[in-house]
Image: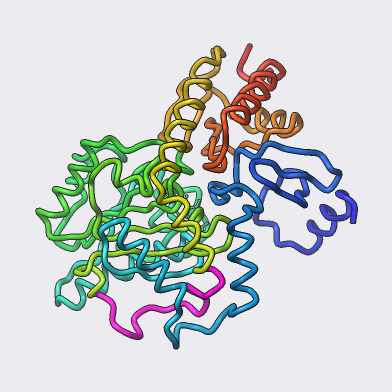
């Protein structure tokens, strides 16, 4: 098939839910992908913060191949060796106790919401409300999209599940205004991703922890995007030194294999008993064998130190770009955002034409979530392409 064939047949047969760029990637290696015409791109999107070890990583390929030749899937009617290994690694690296595996970020958040509610139901307490934040993003299933504090994702899907209220991110007073005797949990991204790469203020996260302790309710962190080494810690909350009762992750956990996880303390996890929640595919041997290897690689301090160093290197390089349309550069580790005073779609298109893949976060923010394995040469290449693209981009100059 030619590029034109793939796109036109895709438009005919694939449901129209994505605004896609006219690009057909067919191969990836390390920080690069190649399209169907053989053109090379430096990938600073990494499948939207998923391919944390780059494309076609040799160690992951090896594990995948071995597991594929051994056992793919059996269901959770049985004990699964790689699932147990991955759970143990997640629990010991975080000081948490129990893990539930699923297949995506939205599902992990659904599981967290259900666990919080079920826990208080079992305690005979009338607590079911979840407080989330404006500009948050928690996924597209009905509860996760309701938890998402952005009206545009709710439009047309009413009636939405009840029991959600929204506070202002980084504003503890606004949380105190909505908290009440029915609140069972506060759910927050330590660094808002889709909402424009906004790190939580440490005082705010600490304040949420204190508030949850005072009220006897759960603090849930959504680390679907900011977790798995992205910030230079295995999970962003470890950097804030604010421990949740429940947290979720997905994206980078499988390095490209679909998998999500909801991780909880013993106390919170006691909310679920057999039959309360399930997933046919959740934690299957193929996905967890890969995730287990990803965890080995990413948990290593040398690996994490390199993420911090590359994050700082990229941040400094971005800060140095002198363009009066740039409003802010922010983020943590290799989760950075560059905010402009105008929409960035066209800038991203120019970068793609020039061989650099970037993605937006909201309308005015360019997001940088490259593989965590990038090096200085690749960062320099990305920044040079971005500078060239900025020279060509006319928006917001007049
Ligand atoms: C913070 C956060 N939570 C949840 C999700 C949803 O994850 P998924 O698309 O795997 O369902 C995303 C996806 O971008 C996310 O960034």
Q: Residue furthest left?
A: 214
Residue 159 appears in the picture as rendered: no
Point out residue 367 in the picture as x, y percentages from the top left corner.
54, 35
Near-viewer residue (93 or 205): 93
Q: Is residue 68 above or below residue 35?
A: below
Drawn side of residue 4 relative to residue 348, left or right? right
Seen from the viewer's position, the closer of residues 164 and 1 is 1
Place residue 145 in its image quadrant.
Answer: bottom left
Marker count (numbered): 0
Q: Position of residue 375 (x, y in %)?
A: 57, 33
Left or right of 181: which side holds 277? right
Give percent across and percent down for residue 260: 46, 63
Residue 340 appears in the rendering: yes
Asked whether 327 falls inside the magenta stretch, the response is: no
Display coloring: rainbow
Instruction: Tell me the residue at 38%/44% (across/down).
Output: 301
> Which residue lies at the image location 74% right of the left edge and 62% below the top edge?
14
Q: Left or right: where does residue 9 sit relative to residue 144?
A: right
User: Residue 186 location in percent, x, y?
Assistant: 26, 54
Q: Is residue 270 above or below residue 254?
A: below
Residue at left 21%, top 62%?
Answer: 184
Identify the image quadrant of the N terminus.
bottom right
Prevalent SS, magenta region: loop
Q: Which residues are magenta?
A: 271-287
- Note whether 122 is above or below 133 in the view shown: below
Check residue 273 for magenta coloring: yes
């Amino acid at each position: 098939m030619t590029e034109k064939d793939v796109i036109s047949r895709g438009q005919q047969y694939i449901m129209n839910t994505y605004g896609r760029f006219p690009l057909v990637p067919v191969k990836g290696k390390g920080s690069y992908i190649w399209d169907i015409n053989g053109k090379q791109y430096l990938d600073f999107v990494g499948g939207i913060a998923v391919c944390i070890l780059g494309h076609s990583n040799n160690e992951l390929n090896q594990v995948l191949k071995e597991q594929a030749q051994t056992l793919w899937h059996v269901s959770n009617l049985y004990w699964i060796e790689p699932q147990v290994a991955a759970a143990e690694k997640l629990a010991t690296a975080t000081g948490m106790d129990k893990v539930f595996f699923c297949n995506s970020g939205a599902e992990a958040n659904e599981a967290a919401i259900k666990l919080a509610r079920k826990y208080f139901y079992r305690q005979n307490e009338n607590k079911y409300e979840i407080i989330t934040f404006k500009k948050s993003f928690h996924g597209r299933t009905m509860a996760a999209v309701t938890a998402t504090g952005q009206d545009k994702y709710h439009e047309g899907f009413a009636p939405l599940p009840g029991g959600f209220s929204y506070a202002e991110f980084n504003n503890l007073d606004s949380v105190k205004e909505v908290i009440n005797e029915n609140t069972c949990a506060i759910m927050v991204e330590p660094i808002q991703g889709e909402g424009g790469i906004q790190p939580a203020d440490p005082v705010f996260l600490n304040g949420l922890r204190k508030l949850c302790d005072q009220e006897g309710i759960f603090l849930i962190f959504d680390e679907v995007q900011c977790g798995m080494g992205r910030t230079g810690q295995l999970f962003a909350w470890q950097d804030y030194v604010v421990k949740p009762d429940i947290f979720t992750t997905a994206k980078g956990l499988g390095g490209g294999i679909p998998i999500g996880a909801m991780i909880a303390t013993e106390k919170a996890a006691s909310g679920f008993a057999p039959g309360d929640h399930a997933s046919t595919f959740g934690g299957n041997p193929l996905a967890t064998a890969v995730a287990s290897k990803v965890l080995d690689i990413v948990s290593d301090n040398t690996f994490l130190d390199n993420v911090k160093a590359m994050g700082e290197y990229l941040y400094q390089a971005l800060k140095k770009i002198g363009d009066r349309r740039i409003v802010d550069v922010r983020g943590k580790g290799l989760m950075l955002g560059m905010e402009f005073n105008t929409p960035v779609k066209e800038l991203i298109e120019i970068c793609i034409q020039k061989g650099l893949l970037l993605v937006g976060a909201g309308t005015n923010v360019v997001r940088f979530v490259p593989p965590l394995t990038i090096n200085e040469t690749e960062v320099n290449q990305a920044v040079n392409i971005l500078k060239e693209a900025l020279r060509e981009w006319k928006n917001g100059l007049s």
